[in-house]
Amino acid sequence: MKHLIDILDLSTEQIDGLIATANDIIAHPEQYREKCHGKKLATLFYEPSTRTRLSFEAAMYELGGQVLGFSEAQSSSASKGESVADTARIISCYADIIAMRHYKEGAPLVASLHATVPVINAGDGGHNHPTQTLADLLTIQKEKGRLHDLVIGFCGDLKFGRTVHSLLNAMSRYENVRFVLISPEELRIPEYLRQELEKNGISFRETQNLEESLPELDILYMTRVQQERFFNEADYIRLRDSYILTSDKLKNARADLSILHPLPRVNEISVQVDSDPRACYFKQALYGKFIRMALILCLLDIQ
Amino acid sequence: MIINPISNGIVIDHITAGKGMTLYTLLNLAQLDCSVAIIKNADSVKMGKKDIIKIDRVIDLNFDAVAYIDPDVTINIIRDGQLVKRKHLDIPERVEGVIRCTNPRCITSTEQELPHIFKLTDREKRIYRCIYCESKAKSKTLD
Ligand SMILES: [Zn+2]
């Protein structure tokens, strides 16, 4: 593996390898403190995403490496009109690995075609966000002990939610995984994805009812309904509150349900749920750091 | 209708009727200084109607572009009045500079010099997607 642009660039064996490394880091953090000594990670964030950027930076610091970069386009050479390709070539002279977030779809791929160091896609518009998916996969593995034989519910914005699309794609490759897709009519998964699931013989069901679906789920993946995806504010306000998870609704859910959310949350999960042992979304952020550490080691070819 | 036979050149035959002009535009044949003939709606035993393009010189033809527009054409290369090569095309796996990505969120929308590259993702349905943003190809050609 040279770069990570799309989660499907990784085979399930490679994902297993990253999860194994992450688990070893969790078990023996002291053995990893100097692994990236003398190495530099460049975080090139053309749009702000404090959470993702800090996760990458924390990951690199915990490996003993250093970090440089920028956190928004205004403070970078992009504001002077430099192309992504040129930036990638130049940053390759200063850093050993690049994590790029960009508001345009495909920008990290362009960077990977011109950089001489590994490039990680840290989110490109509404397109891909593979390290979020890796964090989700590690969370499921940690919580359930497996990535196969699971019933996974996705709830909320299934139309524009890129984290949903990537996790669906990634989980479709494991044995006996079934999906329950819970969303308002307007925010159902895109047609091409539905065709893909049907073509690959993946078992899934679409529904508008969260409460009724809860009892059969091993995993519930909640998502935020984002205002910027709507042209019409009235539509946004009407749909935003449709699918809110509360302690009350959880009464019928299984005792071993795991609730995930890519964060940040607005109000789709009530804060009462935070103290429920089934809530895994803050642990998910922690696992995100560990899987990024595993990924950096893998891309830098450090054992 | 008489068009003189060519002694050195290329005949693109069996073009689906109506696609002749698309190919003419896409292949930039207007730029050539040699004679170029487009025959529209010629009678064809096999196809009923077909278009034909005759180019009076052996030019460097972008076969991927031709095959993207119409994979069923026959390409005849003629030298010294003799048919020296008859070529059938395969559906190209990847086309560069043929289709433009129209997704306004794609990196190609802000970086003008990036080559527009599409890859074949569904052979059966002949679906091409932008390598950068994975949008499905909509318009047939660069315009
Ligand atoms: Zn595109």
Image (cartoon, coloured by chain):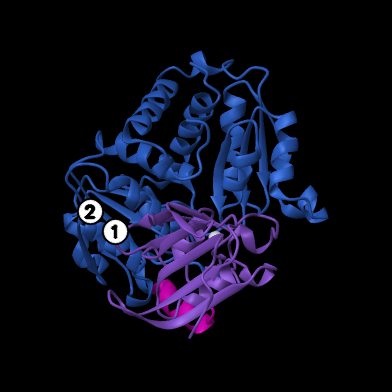
Chain colours: A blue, B purple
Q: Is mark 2 on a helix, strand or loop?
A: loop
Q: How crowded is mark 1: few (under 14 residues within 10 Å), some or many (20 or more)?
A: few
The magenta region covers A230-241
Magenta-drawn stretch, dominant element (helix, strand or loop): helix
Which of B85 and A112 lies nearest the eye of the viewer?
Answer: B85
Q: What element carries label 1?
A: helix
User: Which x, y percent locates residue B15?
Assistant: 41, 72
Which of B49 and A144 lies nearest the eye of the viewer?
Answer: B49
At label 1, which amino acid type do we have? Glu
Circle on res. A196? 1
- Within the image, what quadrant is residue A19 found in? top left
Would you say residue A11 is visible in this rendering? yes
Which of B26 and B107 lies nearest the eye of the viewer?
Answer: B26
Query: Residue at coordinates 56% horizontally, 59% vertically from top-left?
Result: B8
Q: Is mark 2 within 8 Å of ligand 1?
A: no
Whether residue A89 is situated above or below residue A124 in the rendered picture: above
Given the image, what chain letter belongs to the residue carrying mark 1? A
- Within the image, what quadrant is residue A43 found in? top right
User: Which x, y percent locates residue A169?
Assistant: 33, 50
- B66 left or right of B124? right
Whether residue A110 is situated above or below residue A55 in the rendered picture: below
